[in-house]
Amino acid sequence: MDVDAYSYAHRGSWNRLDFLARKGKLTGAEADELVALYRRTSQQLARLQTHSPDPELVAGLSAVLARARAKVLGTRADTWSEIGRFFTHRFPAAVYRAWPWWAAVAAVFLLVSAGVGGWVAESDSARSVLGIPKNTEAITAPGGAFETYYSEHANEAFAAQVWTNNAWVSAIALFTGVLILPAVYLLFMNALNLGVTAGLMTEAGRLDSFFGFILPHGTLELTAVFVAGGAGLKLGWTLVDPGRLSRLEAVARQGRATATIALGLVGVLLVAGLLEGFVTPSGLPAPLRIAIGFAAEALFLLYVFGAGRRAVLESGRDKTDQTVADSVIPSR
């Protein structure tokens, strides 16, 4: 089967089904049409699932069928179950599908930061090139600006401030990704700032303090930034190379995935903000604080590569819609 040709041939009826499923009140003829289209589309979905389909196509068609089924049965989707499904299926699946992009962003980001850090620590010319003051002891000394930054405000207020700032940075990285260069610039500047700080702390012989204050929250926080940047750049590249779909369809599909990631990252950044507000400046030993940060990072990665991968696989093989169609809707 030519999946693209099949999708193109039936897209009109799928759009019509979606329109009827969303319409508030149906006439008798429209109700009959909805039932007929639902049965036909369920069969078409089952056929698509046996021919290595695009998982995003299957997921989109499954969502249309879910709305139509709710309309046919006269029920409404439970709000809490929809929220639960978002966090168990939609968000981790969207992050999982984009993982090559955000993994590449992470690799380049960390390489740039490490390179800048080594340059600042080893070369005097770095200070003049980057405009770094000659005397930075007020920043790097014990109890200096680097350390007091995490404790100069009340924990609750600092956590909220960090959450807001990180959400803003991630949103910019996500939605300027469609233009590619602004997102690249934003990511580069963040990598540069991290590298400069690491270099100055290394030069002062306080790299242990740097990692002790950065790693408890920074592992999860930076991962969220990497995901945002990767998803944003994937959206921008979709505009350049839409693949088998039309440019409008491809960007619309990837835009929905990007919006899903943006919404889910709000929760991830909330956790990172709580870590930065309560764990990083706490009196706990540095190894314990770092262990808490690593545990949060490990849980997120298990969530993405566990629940996300499973959701993607299920979207390609789930034939529940066909079973429901045969058992609930009588033949006509």
Image (spheres, rainbow, N blue to C red):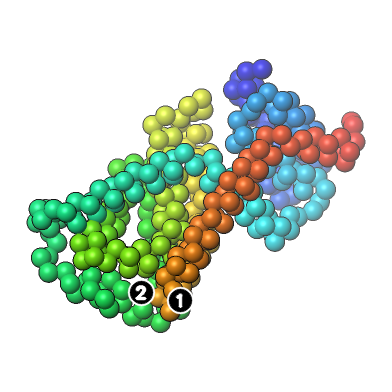
Locate residue 53: give its quadrant.
Answer: top right
> Label for residue 150?
2
Q: Position of residue 327 (x, y in %)?
A: 89, 38
Locate residue 144: give its quadrant.
Answer: bottom left
Tag 2: Cα neighbours inside 10 Å, few (<14), some, or many (≥20)?
A: many
Q: Amino acid at mark 2?
A: Tyr
Q: Which residue is mark 1?
A: 284
Residue in the foreground of this view, choosing between 264 and 3? 264
Q: Position of residue 220 (x, y in %)?
A: 46, 58
Q: Are marks 1 and 2 in contact (CB under 8 Å)?
A: no
Residue in the foreground of this view, choosing between 271 and 12? 271
Q: Secondary structure at mark 1?
A: loop
Q: Residue at x 32, y 68 (%)?
A: 209
Q: Amino acid at mark 1?
A: Leu
Q: Position of residue 222 (x, y in %)?
A: 41, 56
Residue in the foreground of this view, choosing between 29 and 201? 201
Q: Position of residue 265 (x, y in %)?
A: 50, 57
Q: Marks 1 and 2, Cα distance to the nearest angstrom? A: 14 Å
Q: On the rendered structure, is 97 left or right of 316? A: left
Residue in the foreground of this view, choosing between 200 and 183? 200
Determine if residue 30 is in view: yes
